[in-house]
Amino acid sequence: MEQRHTILRRTVAGAMTAVMLVGCAGIPAFAAEEDTFTLGIYSTTDMHGKCFDLNPIDGKEVKNSYLKVATAMKEEREAMDGTILIDNGDIIQGSSIISYNMNMEGGVDNPMAICLRYIGYDAFVPGNHEFNFDMETQQIFYDMLADTTDKYPGTPVSALCANYINVETQEPNLTPYKVMTFNVGDKEFKVGILGFENVNVPNWDLPTHYEGSDFVHADNTERTYAYEWVTYWQEALREDEGCDFVIVSCHSGEDSGTVGAGDGDAVETGETDFSPENQVRNLVENTTGIDMVIAGHNHTVGVTEMKNADGQTVPCVNGGTSTLTKTVVSIAADGTFTIGESQNLDLTTYENDAGLKELMQPYYDRTLPFISEQIGTLSGDWDDETDLFHVQSDTMNLVHEAQLWATGAQLSISSPVANKDFCIGQLLGDAESAPISLKDCYSFYKYDNNLIYMIQMTGKQIKDWLESCTKDFTVEADGTITGGGFGTDQLYGMDYDIYMGNPEGSRVVNLTYQGQPVTDDQTFTVALNSYRLSANAAGDEFGWYAATGITMGTDAVLWDGSVSEQFGSIGGSVTLVIAEYIKAMTAEGKDITPPAARSHWTLNAGASDSTEPVADTVTRQAFVEKLYTAIVGDASVETSPTAFTDVANIVAVDWAADQGIISGNGAGSFLPELAITREQAAVMLMNTATALEKGPTGTWAVQIPYVDADSVSSWATDGVMWNVIAQYIAVGEDNRFNPQGTITSTEADAMIAALTTAGA
């Protein structure tokens, strides 16, 4: 890695010197016949691999790709005396075409570099997703942009970043800025372009992807662009270079209250305090000397006017993943200028550029069969749950099973990153079986830049992280729970319940592993993705580091899928690992069916008494024994020993298992000492009624009228529906079933009495 790192330094250092010399000497000076010069400044941002007019995943048209940018810029260049075109980053991740190139072809002949060169971009500012990949793969991309031979179509593109800093030398790794010179009359008009990467890259990407570097100078303790500009670049551009106009291109959003949401729109976080992630307004309002800002990262289309420290208006443009921004600057012969209104050009109104499409066609042709090939067959009774953050689902259980298979870990941690309103069951429709391909895997795990790792965690670290995740949820006035995002993980392999009504720090209760309470000092192996391990003391967006103290550099990291023998060839991508799991099951002659869950979790709006022992709370074993006494009494019955690992020689449990009343947690445990919940009791009562031929028969279903119906676990739905009919379990005047609530001995006796007397 040290050798690779040195190669990066030498290459970019040479490129930086060359670009700055050319810029200062006057990059081909653009002249106008008139005394007034119209300069068009254009930008794109967060284009995320959109290099073709069809999406291989769904076959739909991509209406705002670089093919449209190419056409638009041909028209704009004809209308202007001079142009500047800047891409503000996040382009080598986000589509299946670039994913195939980066993961399967090592980024060689990168299609995105070809797009920028063909269209004639003057500058490229890296986004955080450029650091999803190792330094060698990044270097291939930058070398392609800088290439001056005829190996690639188009013209070289300057990669600019003033705050990607070598920790040892405190110098930028990439060219910090570029100066473009335009002749207006008999005078030169100099435009400086400065690039800023998002300072929060360490929150999201592995240290090996920016080894020996940070995204601010060492003395910039607040990690602000304003400090970088005032301390390092204002004098360089305004005085040393004599720039008449300065553009700062920042891969950062305008305000602290929005964050990007993958391929969707920006998400309002509600935060108003300064955020290093989105700090363009902070930059403008605390500085002078900047004439225009290009923003991005937050996927928000628009133009915002801001006041700088002197009260002067500074336009801020944001292409927001889908538009080409346009700002016209009119420059007079005396060097004065006027900034016209900025606008977002709608790329959907332009035709696709035929020349660029021809260049991109081979990439599409290689990607389509790779992602479309059938890798397995779905069958079985998959649930239709799409509320993946709030309810345990078959879809997420499959993700966890794949992570456990790949790593051999005991537990799996993952956040739901499926497409909105998607679940695996939709792939089946009304059919009994259906093919599944890699493109389907992208539908339920869309971020293939997440890499698979295995770490060691203690019981305390696990609980503290789950507690931290609960802060992402909000209980609304009607009792529904909203919230959840990329920082909201689910744990698989342990049973637990979350009660939002409990105080912070005590919301996660009943945390058990194989039927036994988890202790603080127990250790477990855990599969998870690389974004958690990129957190550290300086960058901890989701609170992982605060809760666990685990980073990529600690001994807790046991295994790295990106360099493993089995998964190194696919970069350790979680999405591709899921596909490999499906292929492995298929090779064994198995269909892909809903996993038998190894653990269960619930999310509840109310409070729980489980943080304090309740003497009269009925356990699962006690409830089964009450059922046995009521149904069997003194009669003699023959039972078979159950296969539960945590009970032995308990006649009531053996009987209940024989009768199909209980099935345990799906991982071989009955969990006898845990307090039984009302929804668990409902399922046992329905199963008992069925055994007594009092239960549901044929095709049946009723609507659950309880106001907290959404809180019922999917596996308990039938039991609660049957309770609507049979009314074994009483519901209060508030019409809340309280599915995860516990029951007293008196309540248990009343439920069982209602069952045994029904139909008598």
Image (cartoon, rainbow, N blue to C red):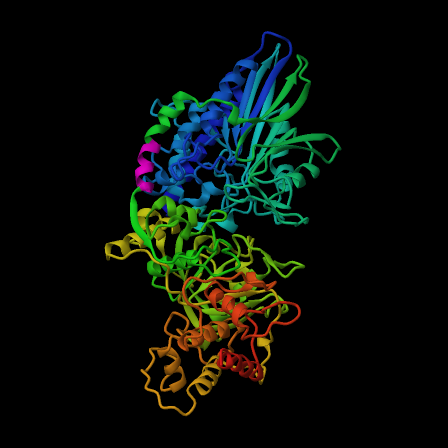
Give the residue drawn at x 51%, y 63%.
548
Is 367 inside the magenta-drawn segment? Answer: yes
Residue closer to the observer: 203 or 630: 630
Give the residue drawn at x 61%, y 16%.
38
Residue 274 visible within the image: yes
Residue closer to the observer: 87 or 405: 405
How far from the left and from the top, in percent, is residue 10? 41, 36
Q: State the image quarter where residue 181 is shown.
A: top right
How far from the left and from the top, in percent, is residue 356? 40, 24
Q: State the image quarter where residue 647 is shown.
A: bottom left
Q: Point out the residue furthest to the bottom here.
A: 634
How far from the left and from the top, in percent, is residue 738? 58, 69
Q: Which residues are magenta?
A: 363-372
- Magenta part, dominant SS: helix
Q: Point out the residue furthest to the front here.
A: 760
Is 243 inside the magenta-drawn segment? Answer: no
Q: Is residue 639 above or below residue 129?
A: below
Give the residue drawn at x 41%, y 30%.
52
How far from the left and from the top, in percent, is residue 287? 69, 36
Residue closer to the observer: 645 or 322: 645
Q: State the image quarter where residue 292 is shown.
A: top right
Q: Point out the residue furthest to the right here.
A: 311
Give the residue drawn at x 55%, y 69%.
739
Residue 157 visible within the image: no
Count of number-bearing discs: 0
Q: Is residue 445 left or right of residue 618?
A: left
Q: Is residue 397 above or below residue 126?
A: below
